[in-house]
Amino acid sequence: MPKTNQKTVIGICGLGGAGKDTAIKEISKIRKISEIQLRTIVEDQLKLEGKEINNENLRICATKLREKYGQDVIAKRAVKKVKKMLLDTDFVIINSIKSLDEADTFRKGLKSKFILLSVYASPKTRFERLSKRGLAWDMTDYKSFEWRDRVELSWGLGGAIAMADFIILNEGTIAELNRDVISLIKRMEKQKRR
């Protein structure tokens, strides 16, 4: 893929198990990227508070931060980091945007460099994936899985998913997702060169 001299920041949103991390891995195969995970900003807060980093604490802490400082507090903290990253790279991925407020903060802070990408999969598909994936923050019982979705939707994630610049439907295989990701990145870069 031809390299452009334009800076690009792709913010990725989607519910747990939709395929965000898999999409990022595929992008990294065709473009040199730098990645920032928004979860690490909440993890840093938990470390400051001396609390264990686990699924429940991450969501409780993120909710408290949003209630105290606004829905875009995590994005505001991340914009500074992304701007520093752009000094050394021309392609940054922000994983995983949780609200339209966050997306708007990135749009304001990063201007035309920012593109919002949503990766979507049905609850059934996502739960099956999370049950098999085995990461520490994955939910393996359906009640906890629904709780996680409801918390993230209460932050405004549904609005970000609905208002994304591009959406990838990920109900199939990894190979199908990878094909769709490559096609999308090529299309994005073609538009940027115009």
Image (cartoon, helix red, strand yellow):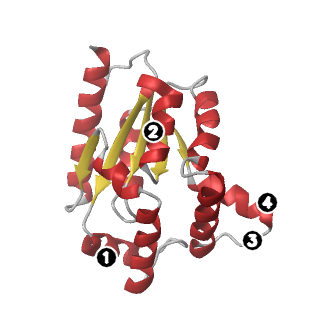
Asked whether residue 141 is in view, the answer is: no
Q: CA distance from mark 4 to mark 3?
A: 8 Å
Q: Identify the disc placed on residue 104.
A: 2
* Residue in the picture at 33% in, 61% down: 18
- Kindly identify the amino acid type of the residue bearing the numbered disc 3: Lys
Question: What's the mark number on residue 48?
Answer: 4
Mark 1 or mark 2: name the one nearer the start of the chain: 2
Residue, x 45% and y 32% (percent of image)? 107
Label 2: element kind: helix
The C terminus - image quarter = top left
Where 158 falls versus 114 (above or below)? below
Sequence order check, earlier mark of 4 and 1: 4
Residue 40 versus residue 106: which sits nearer the camera? 106
Q: Count residues near mark 3 (Cα–Cα under 10 Å), then give few for <14, some for 14-19, many for 20+.
A: few
What's the residue type where badge 2 is placed? Asp
Kindly identify which residue carries mark 1. Answer: 128
Depth check, front residue: 104 or 53: 104
Percent across and percent down for residue 38 are 56, 51
Q: Nearer the viewer, mark 4 or mark 1?
A: 4
Q: Is residue 157 above or below residue 73?
A: below
Q: CA distance from mark 2 to mark 4?
A: 27 Å
Which residue is label 3 attached to?
A: 51
**Residue 85 as seen in the image, left or right of residue 30:** right
> Is there CB contact under 8 Å for labels 2 and 4?
no
Q: CA distance from mark 3 to mark 2?
A: 30 Å
**Mark 3 and 1 residues: CB-CB less than 8 Å, in contact?**
no
**Which of the pair 72/52 is nearer the observer?**
72
Circle 3 SS class: loop
Q: Quadrant of residue 14?
A: bottom left
